[in-house]
Amino acid sequence: MTKNQLLCPQCGSSDLYYESGLVLGYIYHCKDCDYVGSFVIEVDDDDVESVRKDIRASADVSTQDSAVKNTHKSAEKNAHKSE
């Protein structure tokens, strides 16, 4: 029988702790990236590394996308200032 692990949806860490509950349901807090939320990923021990790799790859892509968007916004602001 395989065990399941809970992973942070933002960074893929399994270093989560249960923060609160009751009416709100389960709320988890990631010690690595400070994510707080009820959505976590439950994975079999056998699949942890591949899922963690996918989460980190998608986080890298979204970080790059944010950097590109910020660069475009800065360029637009500078273009408007020079007019």
Image (cartoon, helix red, strand yellow):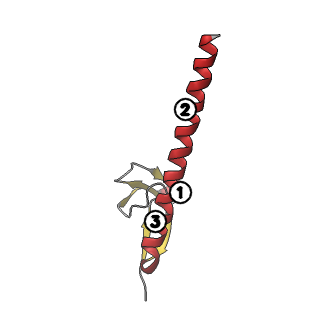
The outermost residue toward the bottom is 1
Counting from the top left corner in percent of width and height, residue 63 is at 50, 46
| Mark 1 or 3, nearer chain start | 3
* Up/down of 72 relative to 52, above or below: above
Residue at 55% in and 33% down: 70
Q: Judging from the image, what secondary structure is the residue with disc 3 in? A: helix
| Mark 3 or 2, nearer chain start | 3
Cα–Cα gap, marks 1 and 3: 9 Å
Q: Judging from the image, what secondary structure is the residue with disc 2 in? A: helix
Q: Judging from the image, what secondary structure is the residue with disc 1 in? A: helix
Q: Which residue is mark 1?
A: 58
| Mark 1 or 2, nearer chain start | 1
Counting from the top left corner in percent of width and height, residue 7 is at 44, 64
Kindly identify the amino acid type of the residue bearing the numbered disc 2: Thr
Counting from the top left corner in percent of width and height, residue 2 is at 43, 85
Residue 26 in sight here: no
Label 1: how many Cα within 10 Å (few below 14, some 14–19, many 20+): some
Counting from the top left corner in percent of width and height, residue 36 is at 45, 50
- Of badges 3 and 2, the one in the foreground is 2
Residue at 54% in and 40% down: 66
Kindly identify the amino acid type of the residue bearing the numbered disc 1: Ser
Residue at 43% in and 56% down: 11
- Of badges 1 and 2, the one in the foreground is 2
Q: Which residue is mark 2?
A: 71
Residue 58 in sight here: yes
